[in-house]
Amino acid sequence: MARIAVIGAGMGAMAAAARLAVAGHRVAVYERTETYGGVLRRRERDGFSFDTGPGLFTLPAVYRDLFVKTGREPLEECVDLVQVDPSSRHVFADGTRVSLPNASRAGVVAALGEALGPDAGRRWGDFLVRAREAWDRSRRPLLEEPLWPNWQVLAEREPYPAVPHKRLLRTRRAGTLAEVGSWELRDPRLVALLESHALAYGLDPRGTPASAAVLPYMEHAFGTWYVRGGMRELARAVYERCVARKVEFHFGAEVSGVLEEDGRVAGVELRDGTVGEADHVVAGVDPHRLELMTGHPLYGDGDVRPDPTERRPGRFTVLLALRGPRESGAAHRTVVHAPDRTAELDFLTARAGTPVRPTVTVLRPDDPALAPDAEHESVVLSATVPQGAQWDGGETGERFADLLVEAAEAAVPGLRGRVLWREVHTPGAFGEETGAGFGGIPAPALAAGRGRFLRPANTTPLPGLYRVGGWSHPGGGLPHAGMSGALVAGLIVEGPEFRGSQ
């Protein structure tokens, strides 16, 4: 039985902790805040409840597997897991609206064909076929296996089978997500639909590889899911599974250093000087913080390294307490697309400048647990914003919140007249909760793009030290966090020969 110290109580860290405890190890989790869950936070006020992190997720099979492997009770006995239908409603810049059914390629194609025209539906259907091929080519190495030592193969090989495009007597294939939209989808509304999946992670489609086509494919193929009571309930269930497996949790326990002895980890040191001895350390923190904890570089020659100058875009959220009931037929999620795509992308990548009206996601769960009674409603608005703008402590944040509310009126009739109160959650507040630098959003790992969209391996050059969570392989997102926990547990239990689930 090995002693294992886990830094952080995020979803990836807890997934690893539960699996390791079932394997017979003694596991202690050290969390600097007073609660668990990482990005899955909840805000409660006056009988209203809000998810301040992700409000939906895909690939529930990741967490079903976690619960099967760590106990008798399956996931569905621990949370009320439901498919959201429609999966999303979209309001495009020209006012066109379309509702997309959940987990139905044929249904999505039919809905787009009816709203945007038969050619648009056919082009999206053809795109999904190619996106599935990209998924089949990249799924295992990017999600189910530890990062390959020869990861350069993933960096150089584009799995998306782009359609040849003739331009100025030359034949080219799309290399970026923006080119996929421009050359293969053509309709600006389909382009907005495609690119919204990248924008949700702060990715600029103009520089994001075509392999990001897997992001909308995952949603269409595996569905969009919600946990009644709020997504925080998923974190509660994973935490309780850890406790049931005898994982020890220490809250308010900030790790300041990773201890070494004879060239390998020996435990962790807390800010108050307390030492937790360990044979293995699993770190669910961003790579820059982890290097500070060890005091030396954690990347060997040829390793995937994070860009030290990268400042990931963050999530700006507005919580709305509304008077009046949720109307019949309201969609759980509505995406109101930006009126000016180029202006939005330029603002997102410029890190400063005058805010423009962004693509806004409006979440209106049909969940009585989130409001004090049936005559009120809880609504969450969110948008992706650049690092560098002064969101906290000034007028910029409030003015930007006004832009989100203005956009959301396309999804919530009479919205501004229904507002009882609102709260603004900035990227800085998100960073304080999660420990992510500047509140940045980690994106899922993607193939191609010269390796810029891969995340550092779960192993490190320091024996016994492992990375877990969204800032490590296989990247950000709730499913990916759960997968990182499974990979780290496999590497510790089976050793470096572990090659992932079969």
Image (cartoon, rainbow, N blue to C red):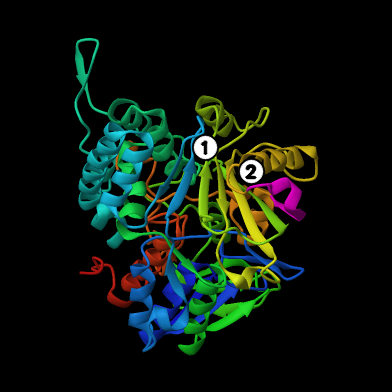
Q: Residue furthest top?
A: 168
For the N terminus, the quadrant is bottom left
**Residue drawn where x is 68% and y is 55% of the image:** 319
Number of marks in picture: 2
In the image, the segment drawn in magenta is 413-425
Q: Residue placed at 72% from the left, 39% from the top? A: 390
**Badge 2 amino acid:** Glu
Which amino acid does the dot numbered 1 rest on? His
447 left or right of 321?
Answer: left
Q: Is residue 306 above or below residue 77?
A: above
The residue sitting at the front extreme is 328
- Corner quadrant of residue 191: top left
Q: Is residue 301 left or right of residue 263?
A: left
- On the image, the x and y values in percent for residue 202 come to 50, 42
State which tag comes first along the sequence, 2 or 1.
Answer: 1
Which residue was labeled with disc 2? Answer: 409
- 13 or 185: which is nearer to us? 185
Q: Say if the magenta span includes residue 325.
A: no
Label 2 to label 1, Cα distance in Å?
12 Å
The kind of secondary structure element at disc 2 is loop
Q: Residue 337: which disc? A: 1
Residue 419 on the magenta span: yes
Q: Is residue 310 something that shows in the picture?
A: yes
